[in-house]
Structures are given as C-alpha cells and as structure tokens.
Image (cartoon, grey):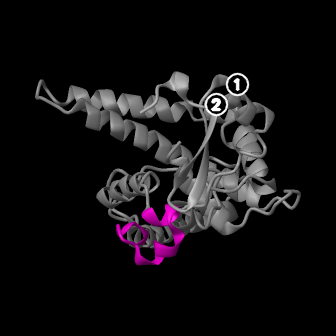
Amino acid sequence: MPSPRNMAPIMQVKFGSYPVLVGSSVEMAKTILKTHDVIFSGRPKTAAGKYTTYNYSDITWSPYGPYWRQARKMCLMELFSAKRLESYEYIRVEELRALLKALNKSNGRPINLKDHLADVSLNVISRMVLGKKYTVKSSENEKEIVTPTEFKEMLDELFLLNGVLDIGDSIPWIAFLDLQGYIKRMKTLSKKFDRFMEHVLDEHEARRKEDKNWEPKDMVDVLLQLASDPNLEVKLERHGVKAFSQVLYMF
C-alpha cells in the first residue's frame, strides 16, 4: 500500500457500481469542502434513507436543496435554539434526580452504571422530543402503544440499520435480492415506527385542540406548529413531521 506521501491529491476508486472521488491532501479537502461545497453537499440515496426515514424526508438523508435548507433553518431557529433548549432544563434536572434516587436505593449492591446513564439520556431525549417517557411502563389507565422493551429495541434497530453497509446501495442491480436481509428489517421497522409515530402525533393533535391556551411543550408540538405554517417555503407534510421526530432521537 502506498504511503500518504506518494498518494495523489485526488484519486478515483470504485465502490461497487459507483465511482468515488478521494481527496487526500489538505488543499484538496479545502477545495471539496469549502470552495465547491455546494457541488459535493449531497448524500447518496441509500436503502436506509428510503425505508427508515419516510423516503428521505428527514434532515439526515434528504438531498441538498430547498427542503434541506428549510430543515436546517428549522433545527437552528426552532428545535435547537438556545431558548428552546433552556426551556427543557427542568427535564434534565428531574431525570438526574431520578438517577441519583435510583442509585441511592441500590444500597451498596453492584450496578451497571452504563445502563443507568443510557436510560437517563434516552428519558431526557424522549421527553424533549415526544413529551413523555416511553422507557417506563405506563399507568394502568393509560393505553400503551409500545412497551419500554419494544421502544428500546426499535431505537437499537434504527441506529443499527442506519449504519450498515447494504450491498444493494453499492450494486443497485442486485438490490432486489436483499442478500443481507437488511431491507426486510428496514421495512419491518418502518411499519413499527409509523404505527408508533401516528399514535404520538394523534395524541399531540388532540391535546392541541382541547387546550385553548395551547403552547408547544416538546419538539413534536413545534414540528406540528411548523407544519401548519402557510409561509413555509416547502410545506412540511405529516410524513415529514414523523421523519423529523424519529431522527431527533439520534441527535
């Protein structure tokens, strides 16, 4: 294998059926990422983007263009603004206290701290995005759309499938064979998440109609409010709200 010193500043290799440019110098990186950033700003369309994010409807997989620019603006100005994040401070405080309380109850017994910290992180994100925790069992009177175990399994599968290397992405003419079984898993996961997200959106919309003094309390509320804004350059459809809500867990 040639040393970095002997490598050309730009090379072409082939990933399956697709040619890929490789910039291997600082100057070439600046040229690609700064001078010609718009040309190289798009991402290739993959099976994960198609099947797990409502046909590339989130900011992660959507192609560069008006929709992506609007999505970026929504994230910066609405979803992750300093004011919005500050408004969720009470959630972080409450979940941290719940963690300390749980650790105190261990009474010196060995515990797996990693699991506790993962639960705290997931609880905070779940409450910020969806308005409540789905990692704990609901009360007897509340209808449970997914169990805590199912919710965690869905998220684990979402993370995994968005990071796999599917052969069909590199060699499209054999994609229909689904040699690794990933596409089948993506379709199954998509159905589960869609059922879950429809339930979440229905709950939020019902609460919005019932409350005369309604104000957005979580990120799904914000997205639904934006979806009803007639001044958006590109209309945010219902599947777009679901796609954004879903990908926010991954942030």
Nearer the observer, 236 or 200: 236
- Give the residue type that dot 2 points to: Pro
Query: Is residue 70 placed above or below 192 in the rendered structure?
Result: above
Q: Is residue 28 visible?
A: yes
Query: Is residue 97 placed above or below 129 in the rendered structure?
Result: above
Which tag, 2 or 1, sits closer to the chain's start?
A: 2
Q: What's the distance in space between the residues labelled 2 and 1, CA to CA?
A: 8 Å
Left/right placement of residue 246 relative to residue 235 reads: left
State the mark number for residue 130.
Answer: none
The reply to whether the magenta stretch includes residue 182 is yes
Q: Residue at x 50, y 46 (%)?
A: 250
What residue does disc 1 label? 27
Q: Residue furthest left?
A: 109
Q: State the image quarter where residue 44 is shown.
A: bottom right
What is the x, y in percent for residue 82? Answer: 68, 29
Q: State the image quarter where residue 140 is shown.
A: bottom left
What is the x, y in percent for residue 36? Answer: 79, 38
What is the x, y in percent for residue 118? Answer: 35, 38
Nearer the observer, 230 or 96: 230
- Give the residue type that dot 1 points to: Glu
Which element is circle 2 on?
loop
What residue does disc 2 label? 9
Nearer the observer, 210 or 79: 79
Q: Residue at x 25, y 30 (%)?
A: 113
- Are discs 2 and 1 less than 8 Å apart at CB? yes
User: Which stretch appears magenta?
Assistant: 167-183
Left/right placement of residue 72 relative to residue 234 reads: left
The reply to whether the magenta stretch includes residue 53 is no
